[in-house]
């Protein structure tokens, strides 16, 4: 792999992004968050967490797809891509349990948030080594309950994982930055 080569996306997602003529910067971001989601889901499965792994990986690979509709949000803050991404996926026949992450990935403190949503949000922070305490606490709670462990044990295990993932953040940031915001 060359220094700026991207990790693979699920083939159906890669195909959809091509059909939408998605900006290279967005494709890079989704591939990198998906790669981190693979590490996080592998860890959670080993910790005994029961969750829909396919949904988390799909969500990580598509969460910002609404930025094909609102490309200005690739370089400036904004949340218009969230409902737009959700609607876009539904319009392409993606079922709600896979499409929902496009709408929910920026909010993890609402009532009834699923463990899958938490893990997509976590991957979307961990790829660039952004640590968000309240989000991590919610994941720790789920891990502790699943593994029948003390919270501090689950915290240490998650902290270890996120520290390791974070060490590779400079490479990921460089790879993403090497891909232009605009197509063509
Ligand atoms: Fe993102």
Image (spheres, helix red, strand yellow):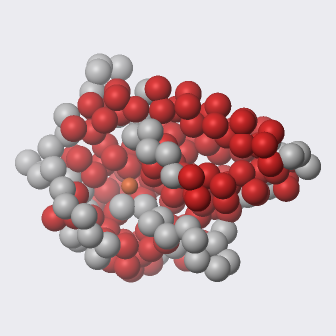
Q: Is residue 179 visible?
A: yes
Q: Is residue 92 visible?
A: no
Place residue 62 in its image quadrant: bottom left
Quarter of the image that includes the N terminus: top left
Q: Residue at x 25, y 64 (%)?
A: 77
Q: Residue at x 19, y 34 (%)?
A: 178
Outermost residue to the left: 184
x%, y% of residue 103? 44, 74
Q: Residue at x 66, y 55 (%)?
A: 137
x%, y% of residue 50? 79, 55
Instruction: Tell me if 171 is positioned left or right of 140 in this view.
Output: left
Instruction: Tell me if 119 is positioned left or right of 91 in this view.
Output: right
Q: Classify the position of ligand 1 by quadrant: top left, top right, bottom left or bottom right.
A: bottom left
Front residue of this view, candidates 165 and 34? 165
x%, y% of residue 27? 30, 48
Instruction: Tell me if 146 is positioned left or right of 110 in this view.
Output: right
139 relative to 72, above or below: above
């Amino acid at each position: 792999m060359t220094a700026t080569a991207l990790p693979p996306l699920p083939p159906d997602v890669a195909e959809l992004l091509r059909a939408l003529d998605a900006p290279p910067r967005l494709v890079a971001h989704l591939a990198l968050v998906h790669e981190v989601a693979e590490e996080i889901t592998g860890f959670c499965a080993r910790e005994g967490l029961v969750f829909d792994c396919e949904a988390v990986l799909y969500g990580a690979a598509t969460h910002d797809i609404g930025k094909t509709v609102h490309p200005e949000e690739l370089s400036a803050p904004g949340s218009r891509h969230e409902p737009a991404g959700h609607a876009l996926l539904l319009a392409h026949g993606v079922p709600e349990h896979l499409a929902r992450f496009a709408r929910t990935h920026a909010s993890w403190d609402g009532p009834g948030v699923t463990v899958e949503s938490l893990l997509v949000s976590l991957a979307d922070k961990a790829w660039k080594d952004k640590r968000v305490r309240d989000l991590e606490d919610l994941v720790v709670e789920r891990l502790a309950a699943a593994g029948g462990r003390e919270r501090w044990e689950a915290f240490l295990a998650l902290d270890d994982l996120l520290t390791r993932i974070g060490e590779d953040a400079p490479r990921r940031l460089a790879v993403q930055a090497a891909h232009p915001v605009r197509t063509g």
